[in-house]
Amino acid sequence: MAITWSRVAHRVAVQRDLPVPMADGVTLLADRYVPVGAVRPPTLLVRSPYGRRGMFGLAYGRTFARHGFQVVLQSCRGGFGSGGLLDPLGDEHDDGLATLAWLRAQPWYGGSLAMHGPSYLGYTQWAIAPFAGPDLKAMATSVTASQFRDAAYVGGAFALESSLMWITLTASMDGRFGGAEAFLAPRRTRRAALSGRPVGEMDVLSMGRGLPFFQDLLAHHAAPEAYWARRDFSASVGEVEAAVTMVGGWYDVFLPWQVKDYTAMRAAGRRPHLTIGPWYHADIRHGRAANADALAWFRAHLLGDFSGLREQPVRLYVTGADEWRDYPDWPVPGMRQQRWHLQPGFALSPRNPGGGEPDRYRYDPAHPTPVLGGPVLLGNSEPRDNRRLEARRDVLVYTGPELREDTEMIGPVSADLYVRTSSAHADVVVRVCDVHPDGTSYNVCEGVRRLTPGSPQADPDGVRRVQVELWPIGHRFRRGHRVRLHVAGGAYPRIARNLGTGEPLSTGSTMVAVEHEVFHDPARPSAVTLPLLNA
């Protein structure tokens, strides 16, 4: 039987600094937001490393308590009064389950639970969701994923700017001048990343002291499996029985892995919802959208009011068309993968490759290829005009014919390139752009693959078949526009420069320029695979 739902806004009472014991004796602190007059209402758990007061208390505590949910907003260990030392990602499984045990022992707990939050707050949900039990009814996750390893080591490279930025930010927040120092984190990070110093020194340059988690990321770059085993919950996503809704952004650093979580749930027979908007990670617009989505989701799955849910589970904002669309699934029905081949004369076409000599460029880590736009953790990463980048000699630019009609591409994107490099250590960066009639060239999506000896294997001529996974897209290339492809050896400082030597990521300093050759003949048909949507 459906529970009667009242839309009257509740007054909110707050209990501060509730002690929550962990299994190892550490005590974490939580604030409880209570809708006045509600008797044992559904509980919403939010676990955060960013504090419990200020905008977090307003956005998650008061907002949802006014709608009839009691909210427990807890600080993760090592910050904002919670005991222990912060070990990012490492304690969230055990601490989350201990928090659930504490919740169930409280007289005000009514036996109905949901979880909510973006980014790290979403990761804390995945860390316990498969093991939470039947009273976990719903989850609302946004700009997050069940594992962060692949976002830190994107394509096997190291996501320098985002990793250093997040670690500097979290290390700044809980000090005496936390708010001001956190505000300066992006500027300090970029200055450190552009310093040219070995990567292992950049935490001191950014924060003024060593940052253990940053050093851990560097230390486990070459062999990450053991370190990440207790921090990766992607294998158990399909076991989550709670109703899950996901909100992401086309320009978010976690989007590829958020979409993989969605497809893993679908493969397990679940029916999650997925919303992807024209947003980047720190975009306030997705915060508002995610809260509205969560409220409707919790009303439905905890209170029996399904009136706020849409019919179709997948909602996408199609860039270029500038409109929202609803679909029954992802990948969307009617999508077919189409190979666009690199051609002689730097052309790009669905036709078979025409042959010709390979194209060449030289990547010099002493003067690394920069990046314009694209996914980064903090800051606006919406598309930017890439013509300045395309003018560089270390970027190959392949351009398709003028489109005769609007062409929509919605789905996964990948590249399949035949490459020979003068060093076994190199990076291959691939980017898709939308070229407007006036010549402006806006990035749509990109990806990277780090090459190491034997990975991938070279043929007798030293040519390697390099497969690169790019960000998924939902984009309309308008009539008169062109599809463009970049191939480069770096995207600095978003990706740590490849020194060309194989020296350890942390301490390497010797730099070797690397010659790249990209083949595009019938025997080596380099191409980008695009998700063409049938009209």
Image (spheres, rainbow, N blue to C red):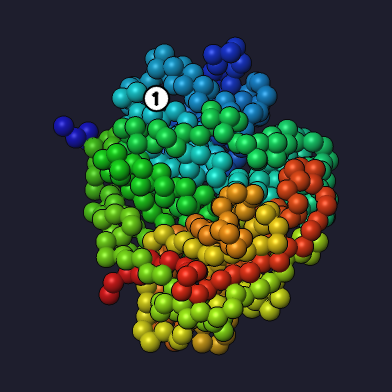
Residue 385 seen in the figure:
no
**Whole-percent x, y for residue 309 in the image:** 28, 49
**Whole-percent x, y for residue 406 in the image:** 37, 80
Q: Can you say which quadrant of the picture contains the C terminus?
A: bottom left
- SS state under label 1: helix
Residue type at numbered disc 1: Phe
Q: Nearer the viewer, residue 216 or 465?
A: 465
With respect to residue 415, does 289 lie above or below? Answer: above
**Whole-percent x, y for residue 251 in the image:** 52, 59
Residue 335 seen in the figure:
yes
With respect to residue 348, does 136 lie above or below? Answer: above
Residue at the disc numbered 1? 131
With respect to residue 420, does 185 lie above or below? Answer: above
Q: Nearer the viewer, residue 313 or 67?
A: 313
Residue 213 lies in what quarter of the image? Answer: top right
- Residue, x 41% and y 84% (percent of image)? 403
Farthest residue in the left direction?
1
Residue 344 lies in what quarter of the image? Answer: bottom right
480 relative position to 494: left or right: left
- Residue, x 49% and y 45% (percent of image)? 144
Q: Can you say which quadrant of the picture contains the N terminus?
A: top left
**Whole-percent x, y for residue 65 in the image:** 42, 35
- Residue, x 51% and y 87% (percent of image)? 437
Mark 1 surroundings: few (<14), some (14-19) or many (≥20) residues within 10 A: some
- Residue, x 61% and y 25% (percent of image)? 77
51 relative position to 515: left or right: left
